[in-house]
């Protein structure tokens, strides 16, 4: 089989075709991406400006918003440029950077969501010990650990993926460079790497997801013991909405990274990938932040300050 030099560009076939239906879908995805960027940027600004939001919970939320802004920026602009201009080629370096940043942010978000569920567990189940168990140092360590573990996984997979020789087509049936999709084009035995990647996925996905399940289970058990209808209603409303977003993010990631090779479909992979690259980043500020009374108060304060400046 003919092989090319690994320095030749890859071709991203993209998510959409140039039909009327796909044009509408592209506009919808682009709108969601813009809404995600605006919503998460707003959260970052509010948390930074309002001292009432300088708490462990909102510090973790600010990191989630930062990751979501960077995640959308890593994939959507390149996809939009390819669709609008027809320039679908991407260099091996650009492909490697996409893999690195995508896995750094996606992996980091997995652990950060687990840290956020632990924060809620401590706040509800151990409120008197909250200042100690969720001190500034603990928050910083959890955040640094999330970023570091994600970066280690991203660096390992990016370097290893691009070290394989690739077949002549170099066509990636996706809208961004994703390691499992790229490995299918390799003209070499990738079984060892795929096994290692599977083990990494167990650590990066299933372990944090198990911690999240445990935290929310303990929260619900604690609320049920309170025997308060109002507390129970609030807990179910909060936990169900949080868990819906977590389920979308983890479910889509597990589908892509842990599904057997024989069951893979490029069309399905592209659609599922769009869930955790565009859809969940758009939902996160709505579910985790903008419904909170503290955030609503910060928004009203910010709007009031802006109106006051305009009247001066």
Image (spheres, rainbow, N blue to C red):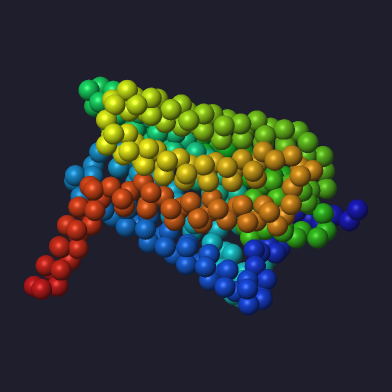
Residue 137 drawn at (x, y percent):
30, 29
Residue name at image x 76 percent, y 44 percent? 263
Determine which quarter of the picture holds residue 230: top left
- In this view, the residue in front, 222 or 199, is 222
Looking at the image, how many numbered discs can be counted on the residues?
A: 0
Q: Residue at x 22, y 47 (%)?
A: 294
| Quadrant of image for the C terminus | bottom left
Q: Residue furthest left?
A: 312
Lateral position of residue 163 relative to residue 77, left or right: right
* Residue displayed at 55% across by 53% down: 275
Left or right position of 144 against 262: left
Can residue 49 be seen from the camera position used here? no
Whole-percent x, y for residue 53 in the image: 23, 44
Residue 131 as seen in the image, left or right of residue 235: left
Which of these two is toward me, 106 or 2? 106
Q: Position of residue 181 (x, y in %)?
A: 70, 50
Residue at left offset 54%, top offset 50%? 276
Q: Image height check: is 231 above or below 41?
A: above
Residue lying furthest bottom: 20
Question: Left or right: 243 with respect to 98?
Answer: left
**Which of the 4 quarters of the picture holds residue 9?**
bottom right
**Residue 67 higher or lower than 303, as above or below:** above
Inspect this view and state whether residue 2 appears.
Answer: yes
The quarter holding residue 2 reads bottom right
Q: Height in image: 191 above or below 64?
A: above
Residue 199 x/y as whole percent: 65, 30
Q: Nearer the viewer, residue 110 or 263?
A: 263
């Amino acid at each position: 089989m003919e092989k090319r030099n690994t320095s030749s560009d890859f071709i991203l076939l993209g998510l959409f075709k140039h039909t009327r239906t796909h044009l509408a879908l592209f506009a919808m995805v682009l709108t969601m991406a813009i809404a995600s960027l605006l919503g998460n940027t707003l959260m970052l600004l509010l948390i930074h400006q309002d001292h009432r939001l300088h708490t462990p919970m909102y510090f973790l939320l600010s990191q989630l918003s930062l990751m979501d802004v960077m995640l959308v920026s890593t994939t959507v602009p390149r996809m939009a440029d390819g669709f609008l201009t027809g320039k679908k080629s991407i260099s091996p370096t650009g492909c490697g950077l996409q893999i690195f940043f995508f896995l750094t942010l996606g992996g980091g978000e997995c652990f950060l969501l687990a840290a956020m569920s632990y924060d809620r567990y401590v706040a509800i189940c151990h409120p008197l010990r909250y200042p100690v168990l969720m001190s500034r140092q603990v928050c910083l360590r959890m955040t640094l650990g999330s970023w570091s573990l994600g970066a280690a996984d991203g660096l390992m997979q990016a370097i290893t993926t691009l070290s394989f020789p690739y077949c002549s087509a170099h066509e990636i049936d996706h809208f961004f460079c994703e390691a499992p999709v790229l490995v299918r084009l390799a003209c070499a035995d990738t079984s060892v790497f795929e096994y290692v990647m599977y083990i990494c996925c167990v650590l990066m996905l299933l372990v944090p997801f198990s911690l999240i399940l445990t935290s929310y289970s303990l929260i619900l058990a604690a609320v049920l013991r309170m025997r308060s209808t109002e507390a129970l209603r609030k807990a179910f409303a909060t936990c169900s909405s949080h868990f819906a977003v977590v389920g979308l993010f983890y479910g889509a990631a597990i589908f892509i990274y842990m599904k057997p090779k024989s069951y893979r479909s490029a069309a399905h992979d592209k659609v599922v990938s769009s869930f955790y690259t565009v859809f969940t980043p758009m939902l996160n500020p709505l579910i985790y932040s903008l419904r909170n009374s503290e955030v609503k108060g910060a928004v009203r304060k910010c709007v009031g300050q802006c109106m006051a400046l305009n009247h001066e």
